[in-house]
Image: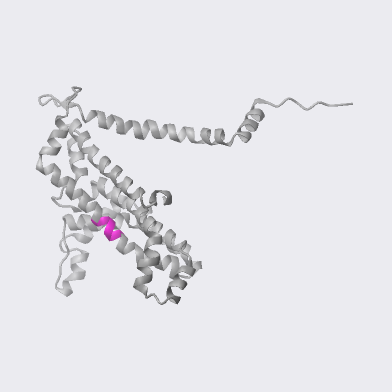
Amino acid sequence: MTTTAPAAGPVRRLAGTLHRRPRLQLSLLLSAPLAWLAVAYLGSLTVLFLSAFWTTDSFTSNVVKIWNTDNFTVLFTTGVYRQVALRSIGVALAVTALCVLIAFPIAFYTARVANPKWRPLLVVAILTPLWASYLVKAYAWRLILAQGGLLDWALKPLGLEGPGYGLTATVLVLTYLWLPYMILPIHAGLEQLPASLLDASADLGARTGRTFRSVVLPMILPSIAAGSVFTFSLSLGDYIAVQIVGGKTQLIGNLIYSNITLDLPLAAALGTVPVVIIVLYLLAVRRTGALSSL
């Protein structure tokens, strides 16, 4: 007596087709997130860019869909907007530089010096501040930086006082907020650094500074650039921290926020400025190979 195998069902036929065609399988897996990216992210950026060419009725404050470049003309011809844009770029660069200076010794210790069994716990400790609320951390720093606050109390015996609220306070708070995003890439880069290279450099008579410049720094430069993508972009677009500890300091995010209800097309034009800056920054970072490290 002979039996025939049951006909393959549609699910089994589909599974067999996907098994034979891995590219089709990958395309189907990526189709949903890519569609969401195109609609939610790229679509919103497109609407933002298009609305920057509209105008606002000065009497009713309603958006009028009349195409013009008046908003961009205002941006390029008004000195305060140029100053705020340059100040925002300067704050983002300062935060990135401070994060690199602070993150490297921490990452070097966690990746190369600490006992291997403690390294996962140290990484968790570095990530712990990210679990706390952004506003809680920002307002905690407001209390620390307040006149007569904790920082003033700590510096008073030295005859010094804290910076108070302002641009310096904004840089300090943003550095604290985004520091883990710089530590982790550098930690990963140092962890992958072959110990044989350091030993070879020492055997050839190179001192610590020469080893750092010639061996360590070139190897972890992509990691630093990868971390800077986060610290630079997050600092450039931040507007909450500067409202909490910035005093009278204005960054481009504050201008966008304040103009959303008053002049939406102008706010959209302002919003294109950090987008363009970040795109240019990413193109520059891409040359270091950092994007492949993300």
Quadrant showing the N terminus = top right
Q: Is residue 129 visible?
A: no
* Left or right for 122, reference 92: right
Q: Nearer the viewer, residue 268 or 72?
A: 72
Q: Nearer the viewer, residue 2 or 19?
A: 19
Chief SS of the magenta region: helix
Residue 144, percent across and down? 22, 61
Point out the stretch of residues depicted in magenta.
Answer: 94-99
Give above or below for 248 relative to 259.
below
Residue 13, percent across and down? 66, 28
Looking at the image, which residue sits at the far right? Answer: 1
The part of the image, by quadrant, that contains residue 186 is bottom left
Taking the magenta stretch, the answer to whether it contains residue 239 is: no
Looking at the image, which residue sits at the far front? Answer: 204
Q: Nearer the viewer, residue 68 or 198?
A: 198
Q: Residue at x 31, y 52 (%)?
A: 231
Give above or below for 143 relative to 200.
above
Residue 156, percent across and down? 16, 71
The part of the image, by quadrant, that contains residue 222 is bottom left
